[in-house]
Image (cartoon, rainbow, N blue to C red):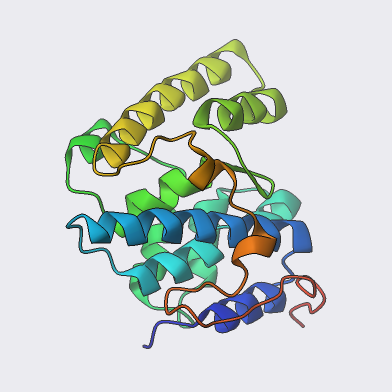
């Protein structure tokens, strides 16, 4: 099964009725992931940027259905992609909300990069990992125990951030990454020439 292009990923999101705000969030996560992935590859990493792009675009494909019906949106999204996207894409979608300590010291993978990039985007704006988690806590923490678990995850992501940026010549809050926007980067796909528009996302529903 071929890796879906950026426009094909947007079509998949539209087919599943993904609202435009989730589509635009996914596009921004993709831009962060490609921004980092290209620079990491320039410093010796061997990340598959087409896989990064497709998985980042589709990482929240199960979000709307999860909100409507309940369940883990990452696992639901992976199930939704069976037969229409390569297994490697579905695997990253299923993993994008989890992070284990062992992954921090291991060589950086496409899955971990998409996971981290998602934690740098609040709605469609690049923010710090701390800002992203404070927003998640405010919106989703239903108990002190849940809040504590999220804070523990924040600590893990900050450790991962140190690992990622130890291979780069920029800092996590430098303007190069904090200034990324969809308008600036629309069309800058993994091959440099794909264009896409999220404005129609959610306009088509599965029958």
Q: Is residue 11 above or below residue 27?
A: below
- Percent coordinates x, y for residue 114 in the rendering: 42, 53
Q: Residue at x 59, y 82 (%)?
A: 7
Q: Residue at x 37, y 62 (%)?
A: 91
Q: Is residue 197 above or below residue 129?
A: below
Q: Quadrant of residue 19?
A: bottom right
Q: Is residue 31 visible?
A: yes
User: Looking at this view, is 24 or 149 the one in front?
Assistant: 24
Q: Is residue 171 above or below residue 150?
A: below
Q: Is residue 96 visible?
A: no
Locate residue 39 relative to residue 182 in the image: left or right: left
Q: Quadrant of residue 138?
A: top right
Q: Residue at x 38, y 88 (%)?
A: 2
User: Looking at this view, is 171 or 124 the one in front?
Assistant: 171
- Percent coordinates x, y for residue 43 in the rendering: 21, 54
Locate residue 120 relative to residue 140 in the image: left or right: left
View extreme (bottom): residue: 1
Locate residue 25 relative to residue 99 in the image: left or right: right
- Percent coordinates x, y for residue 49 in the rendering: 35, 69
Q: Look at the image and tell me in which quarter the N terminus lies.
A: bottom left
């Amino acid at each position: 099964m071929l890796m879906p292009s950026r426009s094909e990923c947007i079509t998949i999101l539209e087919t599943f009725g993904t609202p435009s705000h989730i589509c635009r969030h996914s596009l921004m996560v993709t831009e962060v992931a490609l921004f980092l992935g290209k620079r990491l590859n320039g410093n010796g990493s061997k990340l598959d940027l087409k896989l990064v792009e497709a998985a980042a675009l589709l990482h929240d494909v199960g979000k709307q259905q999860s909100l409507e019906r309940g369940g883990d949106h990452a696992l639901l999204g992976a199930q939704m992609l069976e037969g229409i996207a390569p297994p490697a894409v579905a695997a990253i979608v299923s993993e994008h909300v989890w992070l284990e300590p062992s992954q921090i010291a291991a060589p950086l993978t496409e899955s971990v990069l998409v996971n981290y990039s998602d934690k740098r985007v609040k709605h469609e704006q690049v923010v710090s990992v701390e800002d992203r988690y404070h927003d998640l806590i405010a919106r989703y923490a239903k108990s002190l125990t849940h809040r504590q678990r999220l804070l523990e995850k924040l600590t893990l992501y900050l450790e991962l951030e140190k690992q990622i940026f130890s291979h780069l010549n920029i800092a996590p809050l430098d303007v190069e990454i904090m200034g990324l926007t969809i308008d600036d980067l629309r069309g800058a796909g993994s091959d440099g020439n794909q264009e896409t528009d999220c404005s129609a996302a959610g306009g088509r529903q599965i029958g």
